[in-house]
């Protein structure tokens, strides 16, 4: 299409600058227009594009729209709108236009420039078109009734409200019925919700069915790679909640928040507390049930899993700390340092079932403790002509330091009285000699116990322990996080 032919395009158009919809009860005969909500500055422009022979154009064209206060010269009013790749089918096209808040009753003219395939540049379509209210918009001011029987005349199958915004009070959008109340997809956000109210919700979803697998809010990020988030919750309040998940049912296998990842490197739930100060928690779990768990980690039986129920990682701080009492205060009872050292303010015990099988009777076995870091091993040997050289288990030797002092304790196992002694100790073995009371070499068997310093802890003895500082508790915070502002019934 050359520039000369494009310049002679004829434009036949219909438009509605102001659209007023009057809704009245069927048969009411109301004659006074009732405002239904704020009217935006956006409107829909429909036009027909033909070549110089009058044939309708089928193409994808670029359009430019401007408003003027004069049909021929004058000054431009409002914005210049550039709309690329507009589909023109059978000569017809429809575009949304928004020049801003410029309509105050002053006469205005619309100027259109177009560039279709093969055109070297934009060509102006003259003359400018005067903006007037569409006849049916004027008729709506005096309409007696919209009775629902002719709804199709006022509700086209395709709605184009893209980029539009509404401002008001109370509920901005209410949807009911169907399978999905609200479904959104986008390059950045599927659905974005924001609340500036104290006690408000950026996004609140409620699945009210009493049975079945229901989700109040379900977020799904379909990207196969990169940083994609199914559901993102954020609160900027000092007492806010990024996400609250709540199931009021007292029965069934319910979940307040369910996180799932099918990736071989994914995370079902990820919590991040990125404040540099204060007592924060990436994930906080709480249970008010007498048989509940604040946090439960489960490594399932599927596919013969050999994973871990709960894992802990730390670059510099302790791997784990256990407290008695209420979060974030309480009394420190147990902790594991980053280097693997384990500390507890109680004894190291185990429990074993006693009595008849199935009696459910258990007893405590108390662990030995020591002033130094000792490890021990046990074994048996036999004297031959009054002497034996015992080789120390080489695996055990790798866990201790036999180059420093270690201890060997002997117990003879025979029918005669003998005298035994350790006559030599080395890093790989020790030597034992024994004789009967009349001085003859003994061939008695014996048990031994060897005790040696743990490798890397040779010089430690009753080391002073620096107990981690108590957790700082805000006196206004109370026992645990509490909900702020109006909440759904049952949420705390």
Image: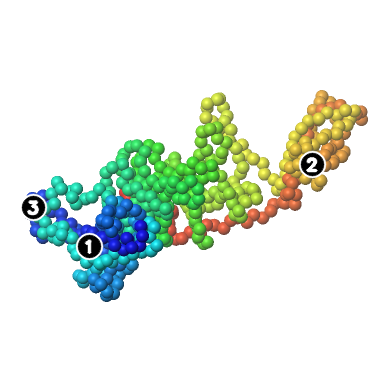
* Nearer-N-terminus badge (1/2): 1
Pick the residue in front: 431 or 154: 154
Circle number at residue 61: none
Examine the rendering and report whether any part of residue 250 can be seen: yes
**Mark 2 or mark 3: whose residue is earlier in sequence:** 3
Instruction: Give the SS element for disc 2.
Output: strand
Tell me residue 99's x, y (percent).
Answer: 29, 66
- Left or right of 390? Residue 294 is left
Residue at position x 86%, y 26% in the image: 443
Total marks in image: 3
Look at mark 1 in the image and give the residue it sits on. Answer: 17
Taking the image as drawn, is residue 451 in sight?
Answer: no
User: Badge 2, how many Cα within 10 Å: few under 14, some, many 20+?
Assistant: few
Nearer to us in this view, 379 or 170: 170
Which residue appears at 32% of the width and 68% of the height?
Answer: 79
- Residue that badge 2 annotates: 407
Look at the picture and state if 460 lies above or below 72.
Answer: above
Spot occupied by residue 249 in the image (x, y as percentages of width and height): 34, 41
Position of 262 with respect to 461 (left or right) is left
> How far from the left and from the top, in percent, is residue 481?
42, 54
Q: Residues within 10 Å of mark 1 (few under 14, many from 20)?
A: some
For the point 45% across and 44% down, which residue is it? Answer: 259
Distance of label 1 from label 2 (alpha carbons): 100 Å
Discs 1/2, front: 1
Nearer-N-terminus badge (3/1): 1
Q: Nearer the viewer's eye, disc 2 or disc 3?
A: 3
Q: Which residue is mark 3?
A: 28
Which secondary structure, mark 3? Answer: loop
Which image quadrant for residue 71?
bottom left
407 and 319: which one is in front?
319
Mark 3 or 1, closer to the camera: 1
- Callouts 2 and 3 close, C-beta under 8 Å: no
């Amino acid at each position: 299409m050359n520039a000369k032919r494009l310049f002679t395009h004829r434009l036949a158009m219909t438009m509605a600058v102001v659209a007023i919809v009057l809704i009245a009860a069927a048969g009411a005969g109301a004659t006074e227009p009732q405002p239904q909500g704020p009217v935006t500055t956006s409107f829909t422009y429909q036009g027909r594009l033909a070549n110089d022979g009058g044939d309708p154009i089928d193409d994808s064209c670029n359009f430019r729209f401007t408003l003027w206060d004069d049909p021929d010269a004058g000054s431009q009013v409002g914005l210049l709108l550039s709309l690329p790749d507009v589909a023109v089918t059978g000569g017809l096209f429809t575009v949304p236009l928004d020049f801003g808040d410029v309509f105050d009753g002053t006469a205005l003219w619309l100027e259109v420039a177009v560039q279709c395939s093969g055109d070297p540049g934009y060509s102006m379509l003259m003359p400018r078109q005067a903006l007037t209210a569409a006849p049916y918009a004027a008729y709506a001011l005096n309409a007696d009734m919209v009775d629902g029987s002719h709804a199709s005349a006022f509700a086209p199958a395709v709605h184009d409200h893209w980029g539009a915004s509404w401002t008001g009070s109370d509920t901005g959008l209410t949807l009911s019925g169907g399978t999905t109340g609200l479904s959104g997809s986008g390059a950045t956000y599927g659905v974005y919700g924001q609340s500036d109210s104290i006690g408000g919700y950026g996004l609140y979803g409620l699945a009210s069915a009493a049975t079945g697998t229901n989700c109040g809010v379900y977020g799904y990020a379909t990207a196969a790679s990169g940083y994609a988030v199914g559901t993102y919750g954020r609160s900027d309040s000092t007492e806010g909640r990024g996400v609250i998940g709540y199931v009021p049912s007292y029965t069934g296998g319910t979940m307040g928040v369910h996180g799932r990842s099918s990736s071989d490197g994914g995370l079902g739930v990820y919590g991040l507390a990125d404040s540099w100060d204060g007592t924060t928690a990436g994930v906080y779990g709480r249970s008010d049930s007498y048989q509940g768990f604040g946090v439960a980690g489960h490594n399932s039986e599927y596919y013969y899993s050999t994973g871990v129920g709960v894992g802990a990682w730390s670059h510099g701080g302790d791997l784990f700390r256990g407290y008695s009492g209420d979060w974030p205060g309480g009394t420190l009872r147990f902790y594991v340092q980053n280097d693997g050292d384990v500390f507890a303010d109680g004894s190291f015990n185990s429990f074993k079932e006693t009595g008849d099988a199935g009696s459910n009777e258990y007893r405590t076995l108390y662990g030995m403790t020591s002033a130094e870091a000792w490890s021990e091993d046990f074994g048996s040997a036999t004297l031959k002509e009054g002497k034996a050289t015992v080789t120390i288990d080489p695996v055990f030797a790798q866990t201790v330091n036999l180059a420093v002092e270690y201890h060997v304790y002997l117990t003879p196992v025979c029918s005669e009285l003998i005298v035994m002694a350790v006559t030599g100790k080395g890093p790989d073995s020790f030597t034992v000699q024994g004789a009967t009371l009349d001085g003859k070499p003994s061939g008695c068997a014996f048990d031994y116990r060897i005790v040696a310093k743990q490798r890397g802890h040779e010089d430690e003895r009753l080391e002073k322990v620096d107990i981690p500082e108590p957790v700082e508790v805000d006196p206004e915070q109370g026992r645990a996080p509490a909900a702020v502002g109006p909440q759904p019934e049952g949420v705390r």
